[in-house]
Amino acid sequence: MATVEQARAALSRLTDAGSGRPMLELGWVQDPRLQGERAVIRLALPSFAQSQRDRIASEAREALLNLEGVRDVQIELAQPEAAGAAAAPSGAPIGAAGHGPSSAPGQPPQRQEIPGVGQVIAVSSGKGGVGKSTVAVNLACALAQQGLRVGLLDADIYGPNAPTMLGVAGRTPEVSGEGAAQVLRPMQSCGIAMVSMGLLIDANQPVIWRGPMLNGIIRQFLYQVDWGERDVVVVDLPPGTGDAQLTLAQAVPMAGVIVVTTPQEVSLADARRGLAMFQQMGIPVLGVVENMSGFIPPDAPEKLYPIFGSGGGARLAKETGVPLLAELPLEMPVREAGDGGRPVVLTAPHSATARGFTALAERVTALAAVPL
């Protein structure tokens, strides 16, 4: 019959895909024990590693079933809120289970700054498909071109596209630290540091999470990432008005939010609701970005075709009393750069869209009082 020592030796070969560290060392696989012909282990994964749960469980099961006399494997799952509880990278406690600040019953949640981060700016949209992630990624790169130390938090959990746009899809971030002090190391690309759910799951793996799990991963992306010293972190929010927006608004002080829309009414209607939500929560709205303001054909760059209408962003800004920050045209280089993994502000800096992103970054820096 196998021994517990043999079980631990078998499990010691299971490693984290990013850091290469053993799961036992990380504390993600715990308490191996033998009960007759059954081997029992406990998985205690932090929220940022929940996407690896099925793979880890499968590999652990296979390793244990190869032991002499083991016919069955039982896997116990710890609640993610209790797993991987951590302090902020500075070492200061950040509340119960390491997921952010707590507050007294009946009191509003206490917002807590991210250690080492100067400003947090969110990019939001009322609906999907308006180019929100394109705006967030290019804004982050344009801010970095101003000499700022920039982070990008891709909080669009259900549609994480930032890794593709920044050329790091398929790579896995490292985990550093021990036990309760484990943190993710951001991926470095295009002059910025970024984290994304897209770095933690397979390309075709859907994220099917309820609100509490979603809240947990966003808080861990805020407080259990080794951001280092950053002048600004840009947060790419999921579209709509829901748990992710509420979690971010309650967790961390924000310099403001940018609302992205297209000129057409079906986009404007949702953008109005999203903008109103942030105003009701007391989050400053820096302004509106109208994306896809018109199409510039490559064979006639002097022309602009308003295929989605015109003036919608200006009307929304006027009726809500916020600035119109930019009107960004749609050009072929935008698509090519996004698919190619280097944003258009880097690959085609003289294009109309890239110049628009550069001007947007300058306005945001002034409005959010980001020190240069």
Image (cartoon, rainbow, N blue to C red):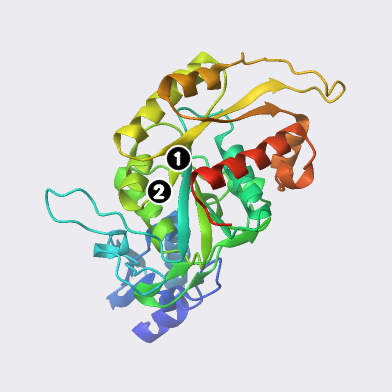
The residue drawn where x is 52% and y is 55% is 232
- Number of numbered discs on residues: 2
Q: Nearer the viewer, residue 319 or 80?
A: 319
Instruction: Specify whether residue 10 is in view.
Output: yes
User: Is 215 placed left or right of 23 in the picture?
Assistant: left
* Quarter holding residue 362: top right
Badge 2: few (under 14), some or many (20 or more) residues near its Cα, within 10 Å?
many
Residue type at mark 2 is Met
Q: CA distance from mark 2 to mark 1?
A: 8 Å
Where is 104 relative to 176, above or below? above
User: Is 251 placed left or right of 264 in the picture?
Assistant: left
What residue sits right under mark 2 in the picture?
254
Of the numbered discs in the image, which one, if any, rests on residue 257?
A: 1
Instruction: Specify whether residue 172 is in view.
Output: no
- The C terminus lies in which quarter of the figure? bottom right
The residue drawn where x is 30% and y is 77% is 33
Q: Nearer the viewer, residue 262 or 356?
A: 356
Tell me, yes or no, whether the two marked residues, 2 and 1, touch with CB atoms within 8 Å.
yes
Residue type at mark 1 is Val
Check disc 2 and report its element: helix, strand or loop. loop
- The N terminus lies in which quarter of the figure? bottom left
* View extreme (right): residue: 299
Q: Nearer the viewer, residue 172 or 31?
A: 172
Position of residue 77 measured from the top left corner of the image (x, y, whole percent): 30, 61
